[in-house]
Image: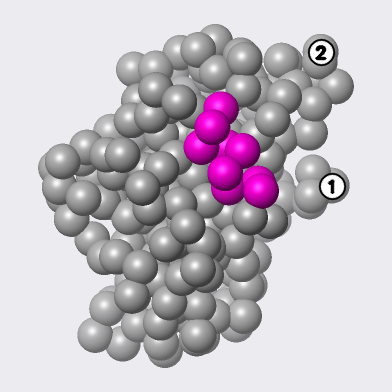
Amino acid sequence: MRNKKYIAPSLLSANFLHLEQEIKDVEKAGADILHLDIMDGHFVPNMTFGPFIVEQIKSAASVPLDVHLMIEEPQRWIETYIEAGADFLTVHFETDPHLNRAINEIKKRGRKAGVSINPSTHPLLLEYVLEYVDLVLVMSVNPGFGGQRFIENSFRKIEWLNNYRENHLLNFLIEVDGGVNENNIKALSDAGVDIFVAGSAIFSKDDYGEVIRRMRERL
């Protein structure tokens, strides 16, 4: 998958009164992946939706679902979210002391396994799982809410991960989530990002296709 750059609109910023239409519109606009943030009100100070909504989204979507578990005890929910329709399933380093086990559980069920790190977490702490993961998600805002400003030192993490990947001949994807927009997407791509999660940068505009087109032009 590393031979392509992927735009992944975050449904956290979509209009949930018209969610099916929002999914169709953003797919028509050129979305490669749909990013779903699952929040439990404990690990992050917000709540979003659970597996039932993921299942409904899956029934409406034609592109892969990138499900990001921002929850405590994520291993309890791996099978549930895979059954609901996750194609990529990402757990947080900060929430799981048995990260290798979680990654293996996801991959054993035939899905892409991801691990995410918060803004204050150094990617060096992932060194002993990087050979097993399919995806590393760098949170470039503090997780919990959409529309936040990009944290600039996230570039250092992305560059560290990209250098590690190249030096060790690994193929995991680097994903970034938080404050991604038309102004910084090229620099993020140059730093090594493969998947760009964008919420308000897309859904706050009237023409989703035009926004995604301009993003792609900068890659």
Q: Decide: marks 1, 2 in contact (CB < 8 A)?
A: no
Which stretch is magenta? 100-108
Image vertical order of residue 19 relative to residue 41, above or below: below
Residue 123 at least partly seen:
yes
Q: Write the residue at 53% across / 57% down.
A: 66
Residue named by callout 2: 167
Q: Write the residue at 50% across / 86% down.
A: 60
| Left or right: 139 in relation to 27 | left
Residue named by callout 1: 3
* Main SS class of the magenta portion in the image: helix
Residue type for callout 2? Asn
Residue type for callout 1? Asn
Residue 1 pos. (x, y %) = 79, 49
What secondary structure is found at the residue carrying circle 2? helix
Q: Write the residue at 43% across / 77% down.
A: 55
| Left or right: 168 in relation to 127 | right
Residue 92, quarter of picture:
top left
Residue 93 pos. (x, y %) = 42, 27
